[in-house]
Amino acid sequence: MSDKPNKKPSRYAESRTRLVMESFHTPADEREHLYMPVALAHVYFPRRDAKLGPTESWKHQSGNFSLRIKQVSVENPRTGQDEFLGVPFGPKARLLLGIINTMALQQGSNKIDIEADTLPKFLHKIGLTDGGNQLSQARNQIARLATSIISVSYKQEDGSSLQANLPIVKGFDLFPQAHPNQLLLWKRNIVLSLDYWDELQKHPLPLSLEHLRILSGNARAIDFYSFLAYRLHSLNRPLFLTWATMKEIFGGDIEAMNNFKRKMRETAGLVKLAYRDARFSCDGEGWTFENSPAPIIKKQTLLLP
């Protein structure tokens, strides 16, 4: 028997364990909501910084759905130069977009009223620290959302394609004139483009805030969870997807299939900690998904800061 003391879990592991236990004790009909457009349960933002050139776009295709994110230049009033800030990426972009969507639906308007100290409260609510580095990263992701145009297209049975260009955020103060290096980041409001607002109202996908807090550090897990939340409760019979199809959906950033299989199994294990009612399995051939209760039982207003 070793005399070495047991290694103490990291703060991150301890926090996740606490969030899992809190979620376990929260009845499904009492879970708080975040909302995403249904299209983003099919195709996804990059999971890491894509580091694109000014004329390049991010592309992701999954089945009949295709996503393109185009950068739009913005003039920096302090320098007079046009800047490309990059496309949104990672878990923060997903969670912050969910917060913005939920506030708009909660307030019933594409013009979202916001207080100056709201961003730190948001970060705390979605399970992130409210330190300066987190604030800076969050501001960067919202700036990227504000300077991107998302195009989602769907190929129909007759071969034609439906496409919508959705600039998301308008009216965000990218370069605050007073104290530009400080991190009280908001103007009085954020304005969603009318096209995006219309799509969000027609096709909102409710997700559990308690679940997303567990997954808040892992973009692939958030994407897989969104996919499950959209698909499982509507299945009439089991759905089988090959490993190749799963890699197309969730593994575009991983070249080797063996690496993807390992990473996807790890991702599924993490998601299962949050969405325990989800019924799915995998073997050497692929993945089987079965009808499962939705993670959200009924519509409910998220109590935002």
Image (tube, grey):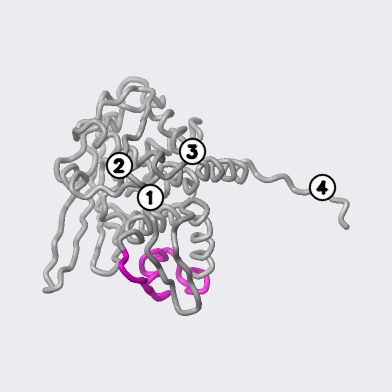
Q: Is residue 243 magenta?
A: yes
Q: Is residue 242 left or right of residue 175?
A: right
Mark 4 element type: loop
* Element carrying mark 2: loop
User: Which of 216 and 280 lies nearest the eye of the viewer?
Assistant: 280
Mark 1 or mark 2: name the one nearer the start of the chain. 1
Furthest residue toward top: 178
Q: How far apart are marks 1 and 3 (CA)?
A: 18 Å
At label 2, the amino acid type is Lys
As for residue 272 lying within the magenta part, the answer is no
Give the mark, 4 or 3, whose residue is nearer the N terminus: 4
Which amino acid lies under the numbered mark 4 shown in the image of this protein?
A: Pro
- Give me the C-alpha separation between circle 4 and circle 1: 39 Å
State which region is magenta: 235-260
Look at discs 1 and 2 and give the one toward the viewer: 2
Task: Give me the disc on residue 89.
Answer: 1
Real-space CA distance between mark 2 and mark 4, rounded to the nearest whole angstrom: 48 Å
Image point (42%, 45%), residue name: 28
Disc 2 crowd rating (10 Å Cα; few below 14, some 14-19, many 20+) is: few
Residue 80 in view, yes or no? yes
Q: Hey, what amino acid is under mark 3?
A: Gly
Q: Is the residue under label 1 in contact with that under label 4 (CB below 8 Å)?
A: no
Tags 1 and 3 in contact by the CB under 8 Å rule?
A: no
Give the residue at mark 2.
299
Evaluate if marks 3 and 2 touch, with contact meaning CB atoms under 8 Å apart.
Answer: no
Classed neighbour count for the residue bearing mark 1: other residues with Cα under 10 Å, few (<14), some (14–19), many (≥20) = some
The x, y position of residue 170, in whole percent, is 21, 36
